[in-house]
Amino acid sequence: MEVNVQVSKVFQEIREAYEKNYRIIVNEGSSRSTKTYSTIQFLIGEAKRRVITIVAARLKSVWCDDTIIVDFKDIMKSMGLWNYKGWHSTSKTYTFNNGSKIKFTGLDVPQKAHGKKQNITWLNEAMEADYNSARQLMMRTSDLIIFDYNPSAEDHWIFDKIITRDDCKFIKSTYKDNPWLEQNIIDEIERLEPTESNIRQGSADEVLWKIYGLGLRAAHKGLIFPEFTIVDSLPEGRIKDFYGLDFGFTNDPTALINIVLGEDKELYFDQVIHKRGLVNRLDPNNPQQESIEGEMLKNRVSKKSRIWADGAEPKTIQDLNNAGWSLCMAADKGPGSINAGIQSIKRYKINITARSVDMIKEARNYKWREDRRTGKTLNIPVDAFNHCWDGSRYGCIMEVKELWEDNLKARTQEEIFAEEVMNDINFIDSEESPWNFN
C-alpha cells in the first residue's frame, strides 16, 4: 500500500543523512521542532521498506508510555497503518506486516536496551542518558543511531564524543521548522522571549528562550526545585494523602497531582492528569470530548479525596463538587501565596514518581527570575513550566504548611537560640578563611 504523508525539513535532513551512509544522526533543537515526529516518520518508512529491528529508547522505560509510544501510535493511525494486532503491550513492541519490529524500552531495562543486536537505535531525549549506556546501544546497532534532545546544558558527552565524529550528521532545528504547529503552542513558546511585554507579564526567561525557543545550548540557573529523587511509586506509610489541581484549557494543561506526606516525613508527588483541552464535565451528547471528570474517573480518583484547586475558578470547582468530588476546595490564593506555597514544598525532601514525565520536566525547568542587569536571582518565579507545581503548592500550602509550623513551635528554645546565633555570624568567603563554601 502506497502512503503519502507530509514531511518537514527535519525529516528530509534525516533521510538525506541516512542515504549518505552516516552512522550517527544528532538532532539538536528547540521545543516542538518536529524532532520526535520526523524521527518516527522516518523509522516507520524504513520499517515498511525492509525487514529490520528498531530500538526506541529513553532513560526510563515508563517514560516511553506517555511520550514516544503515544506519538508512534498517533502517527501510525494518521498514516492508516495502525493494526492493533501488531502491538504487544507487555513487551512494548510493534510488529509490522512485513515482520519488522520496533521495540520501546528504557536504559533501566538493560536486558532489552543492551540485549540483541538491532539495525537502528533511536535515543530520545538523549541528554538524560550517560555515555556508557549510549555506547552499549551503539555497539549493538548495525546501521544507524539517532540522538535527539533539547540542548539544556552547555557541556555534555554528546558534544565532546558524538558530534565530533566524522560519521555523524548534526541537524539543528527550531519550532519554526514545524509546519503543523498550532498558533497557541507558538504563542506559549514565544512567551519565553525576553521582550518588554513578556518581562512585564513574568513569563520571559533568556535561558529557557535559548533552549526551547532558539534551540541553543544553555545551562539552567536558579532552579526552584534543583534536587529531587525519582521513585517507582508512592509510599505505603502515609501521614497525609491529598491532591493539588491547577486548571487549564487551550494554552495551559489541566494538572492534577496526588501528593503524599510519607511516614518518613518526605513529600511524594504523582502526576495523575496533565492535558490540554479538558472541559469540566462529561457530555453524553459528545462522548469524544475529554473532560476533567472523565480523566478523574479513568484514573480512579476517589470521590472522598481532598483536592485543593485554584480558587480563581469557583465555577469549575462547583462542577466537580456536583460530579461527586465534594471535597474539591479552593486553596488560599492571596498576596505572597506563590512563594509561601513553594516554601511549603521546599521544606521537605522531594520525591517524584517515575511515571510523572511532565512534572519531572517542569522540575528541571521551573526557575526563579533573573535580574537582567546584574544577573542576580530574584525571589520571583518565572511563569513557565509550573502547571504541576502550581497544583502542588495549592495542596501543600493547605495541608503541610500548618504541620510544618506546628513542628517549628515544638522546637526547644536552645535550638532556636543556636539558629539565631548562626544567622548572625558573618562568614568571610576568602582563601584565608576556614569558612570557604566555594
Image (cartoon, grey):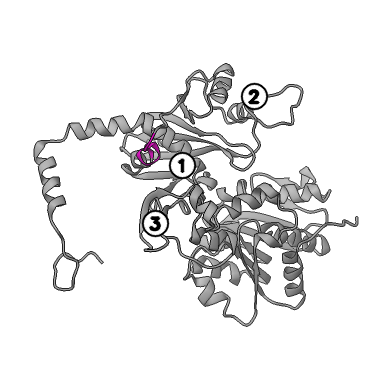
User: Disc 1 and disc 3: Cα gap in Å?
Assistant: 16 Å
Res 107 → quadrant: bottom right
In the rendering, at what x and y percent does residue 48 appear? 81, 60
Q: Position of residue 96 (x, y in %)?
A: 79, 54
Q: Amino acid at mark 2?
A: Arg
Q: Identify the magenta region.
A: 335-341
Q: Which residue is mark 3?
A: 222
Mark 1–mark 2 distance (CA, rounded to whole Å): 24 Å
**Circle 2 residues within 10 Å: few <14, some 14–19, many ≥20:** some
Disc 1 secondary structure class: helix
Residue ID at (51%, 50%): 203
- Judging from the image, what secondary structure is the residue with disc 3 in? loop
Residue behind mark 1: 389
Q: Which of labels 3 and 2 is toward the front? A: 3
Mark positioned earlier in the residue sequence (1 or 3): 3
- Residue flagged by tag 1: what amino acid is it? Trp
How far across and down, in percent of the image, does residue 269 sit?
44, 39
Q: Residue at x 49, y 57 (%)?
A: 205
Determine the CA span between mark 3 and mark 2: 39 Å
Whether residue 239 is visible: no
Q: Are marks 3 and 2 in contact (CB under 8 Å)?
A: no
Main SS type for the magenta part?
helix
Q: Secondary structure at mark 2?
A: loop
